[in-house]
Image: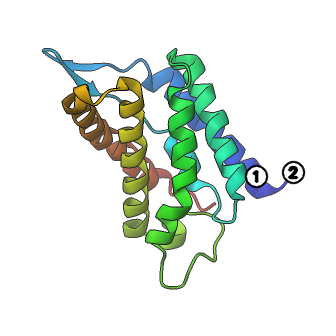
Amino acid sequence: MNKLIRRNLIRAAIILAIQVILLKRIDITFSGFNYIHFTIYPVILALLPYKTDKTLMVLIGFVMGFFVDMFYDSPGVHAATSTFTAYLRYYILALIAPTDGYGKDGLTSYGYGFVWFVSYMGILLFIHLLALYSIEAFSFVYLNEILLRSIFSFIASFFLLVLAQLIFNPRY
């Protein structure tokens, strides 16, 4: 098995375990204000190599989301959102492409710089959360709740992801 594939599988297993075992149990509530949820598993899609086949990327997104759905008792919500995020990943990468292009395998802050990674991860994560809570509510009647959950969950999740990137700074 290729070293790059092995590292991505191990990283994905660890992130999914943290998401479904630890972060699912964290419930931050301030007198009825329950809009903060930690969602870090989209970083698995973000850190995959740029040259990953588009069909494989969408399939990975679906399988990853389906796995999270099994633990969150939300049939299809995370699978649909992860599939959507995986599909949009190439468009986001084209939008923020570095001037030299994507020559390296890993899309990390080590390879392209911290500012680029923060921009990339921020766009990907916010789109993921907005889609997640929109599909979960399945109605624009709850637009305020969708936006509040998306914004506050984005802030909390983004903080965790940036902190992890600063601590671990994966090279691949």
What residue sits 69% from the left and 65% below the top? 51
Please say if the residues under marks 2 and 1 sit with CB atoms less than 8 Å apart.
yes
Up-down relation of residue 100 to residue 6 (above or below):
below
Residue linked to disc 2: 1
Query: How many neighbours does mark 2 have within 10 angstroms: few (below 14), some (14-19), or many (20 or more)?
Result: few
Left or right of 2? Residue 69 is left
Q: Quadrant of residue 116?
A: bottom left
Q: Secondary structure at mark 2?
A: loop
Up-down relation of residue 74 to residue 116 (above or below):
above
Q: How many marks?
A: 2
Up-down relation of residue 150 to residue 75 (above or below):
below
Q: Check residue 23 in the rendering and tell me which mark sits there, or answer none.
A: none
In the displayed image of the protein, which residue is found farthest to the bottom?
A: 100
The spot of residue 43 in percent (x, y) is 51, 47
The spot of residue 88 in percent (x, y) is 51, 54
Residue linked to disc 1: 5
Decide if residue 55 is in sight here.
Answer: yes
Q: Amino acid at mark 2?
A: Met
Q: Amino acid at mark 1?
A: Ile
What residue sits 56% from the left and 18% below the top? 71
What residue sits 43% from the left and 26% below the top? 23
